[in-house]
Image (cartoon, coloured by chain):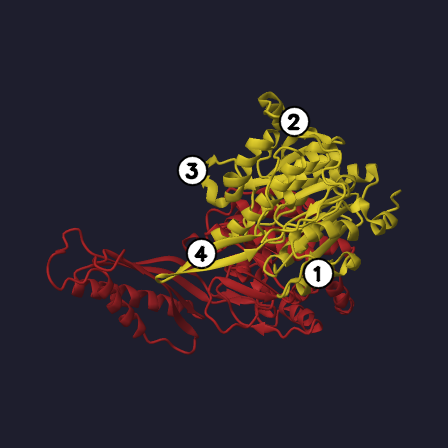
Amino acid sequence: MEQILQHIPEFKTAADAMREVVLANLVLIAEAPAPTGREERRIRVLLERFNEAGVQQCSIDDRGSGFGVLPGTEGTRTILIATNADSLGDRPEDAHVEIGTTDVVGPFLGDNSLALAAMASLPLLLDRLGIKLRSNLVLMGAARMFGRCNLEGLSYFLGNAPLPIKYGVCLKGVQLGRLNYSCLGMMLVDAVTRVPDDYKWAQFGTTGSIVPMNDLINRINKIALPRRPMTSIIFGMLKGGFTYGHIARQTVLSFEVRSESAEMLGQIAQQLEDIGEDVAANSGVSVHMDVFARRQPGGMDISHPLVRQAKAVQGTLGIQSILYPTTSAMACFVERKIPALTIGCATPVVRTDLDELQQPVVIASLADGLAQLAGILLAIDGGHCDAQ
Amino acid sequence: MPSERPRGPAFGAGGKPPSPAADPARIKEWLRTNTFHHSQFADIKTLVEEKQRQGIRISLCLPALNEEQTIGKEIVIFKSELMTRYPLLDEIAVIDSGSTDKTCEVARSFGVDVYASADILPEEGFRKGKGENLWKALYQLGGDIIIYIDADIKNIHARFVYGTLAPLLLKPEVMYVKAFYDRPLTLTKGVRVAGGGRVTEILIRPMFSLFFPELTAIIQPLSGEYAARRSVLESIPFPIGYGVETSHLIDIVGMFGLEALAQTDLDQRIHRNQSTQSLGRMSFGILHTFLSRCEDLGVIRGLPQLNSVIRQFQAHDNAYEELDSKIIEEERPPMITLPAYRKKFGREP
């Protein structure tokens, strides 16, 4: 491992020399819109880049995910690098990337065009460094990952992979230094309040579906959440009605429940059911708690060699490791007991405004991100991350 | 105030007056043989091989004025795709006409040459205008083929370069290639409106139809993306302002015939939209150049001295304010007439 760490600065120099290539990949990928379920254009760009870089078996699977293989010299084990190909935005007119002297700005770069660009650039970096891995390396842009698709692309691939996956690396655009080695348990819930068909619209004081939703939110907020095991509820999205003067027929609250404890998740699920029934009984609207995704907590111990070596690689690059459990795509690996990490590729620019669309990142940090990825790959390939 | 229009010494040299009527069959045949789609040239490797076989150099010029939002992306894409991956371009240079934003800083940070237009051929003085940048680029850049790409394109892609210059590499008789494209505003339910922008359709196309009917085959005569052989560019004058593209087309067809022109469809180009007032000023400049060219070629006789001020109005509540803009459409002479150029490029006097 020491030998690998000694070479890390060379990796960074080589990655730095590829700055224009990485940024060009980023522009082409980020400007190809890829809303969840409609990732074809972006996947095509990714596979074009793979093809040009000599990646083999480039193809698209039944779920629309794109992947390619760099065959190992021995091929006795297979490493999968995966990142979500879909982005939250779906307006092509938003897809404009701006490159300045130090920063690059664009819609949803951090989640997740940057990671795709880094992955598309990796084969060229390995080639320039003369690195030939012993292990097979599968590079994957996973489709249908966000929201109700619930990680479908990666989950399907792992369930049908022709080669058994020995290690997984989940790439995210930001932020450089993150090192997720375990997953929190999680539930994704759509709470729906809907007025019945025989609702008396004309009656003065009728509230529609929004006021019962307000009651529901207040009740959810009163659920006692323990600090240990760490548990939280995150309200992410609220949609209801069409315009000012019309009573809303349906309101949907989308939220995520996270916990270190599967038992706690079960208890909260039961409480949510009870709250829903109660609000329905008191308001006369129907309430449906749609728990469409459940993930169990799990993952590696912090002392696992994969975590240690990844920390060492980050440390050599002067990157401060940020260790915390995640609710990201790594859950697919955890579910199948495949050792895996989630790492970030670049440092975001600190902003004071609340622009949710445009994400600026520091161009110089991209070289660190790529060097980090190459280092971790070599550590896995060399057997330095195998549990004793 | 009447304009003082210096004329290039070789203005329209070798040029022929236009044919009085369009030959529809000729235009149709030209559209069939000399109009391309960028996808025909997507095999960049073949273009590179052809370039190497011919032993020529290709220079890309990005004329710029306050383009900090888009210049970085253009350079990164062209450098990565057409220098690092495929060595199609030998040189990328920004010719700046006095940007006050970070255009030059951004361009330099990505390792391309940046020149202030005023610093090139200082003995010839400096005029502000895109045509001035294009003309001076001819002296500063070394390629046998020069390709000009506007620096304000948002949806930049390598096809803007390889699609535009490929006909020059693959068809020896072609001297000058224009790009054309859809603009998002003209897309309607799958029907592609095969036309230019507002100035093209309202001003240029009617003028070409009246006086130079063959040129109506050029779908976007004002497109800022074009490539040409140095031997052609050095032999024609360059209006310094808005009229440069129109004047090039008239001169080249006059000198070499329609067969020397080609055009490539680049699909779509997204760029900054200009206000109607800006387009009015642009039209004024183009009209100025066009009428003067017509007079020089004997198409129109007895033109009065042309005014150089366009008057526009804007309303403030109940008051109307007059906006006067002075637009002088000077011309730079053919570069080959400059001793400094001939010396630098080893051209015989």
Q: Is residue A74 above or below residue A219?
A: above
- Circle count: 4
Q: Residue at x 86, y 50 (%)?
A: B344
Q: Which quadrant of the view contains residue B34? A: top right
Cβ atoms at labels 4 and 2 below 8 Å apart: no
Q: CA distance from mark 4 to mark 2?
A: 46 Å
Chain identifier matching the yellow colour in the rendered picture = B
Q: CA distance from mark 1 to mark 4?
A: 42 Å
Q: Nearer the viewer, residue A83 or B106?
A: B106
Chain identifier matching the red colour in the rendered picture = A
Q: Which residue is mark 2?
A: B33
Q: Which residue is mark 3?
A: B189
As drawn, the label of residue B110 is 1
Of the numbered discs 1 and 4, the one sitting upstream in the chain is 1
Of the numbered discs 4 and 2, the one sitting upstream in the chain is 2
Q: CA distance from mark 3 to mark 2?
A: 28 Å
Q: Nearer the viewer, residue B7 or A200?
A: B7
Q: Amino acid at mark 1?
A: Phe
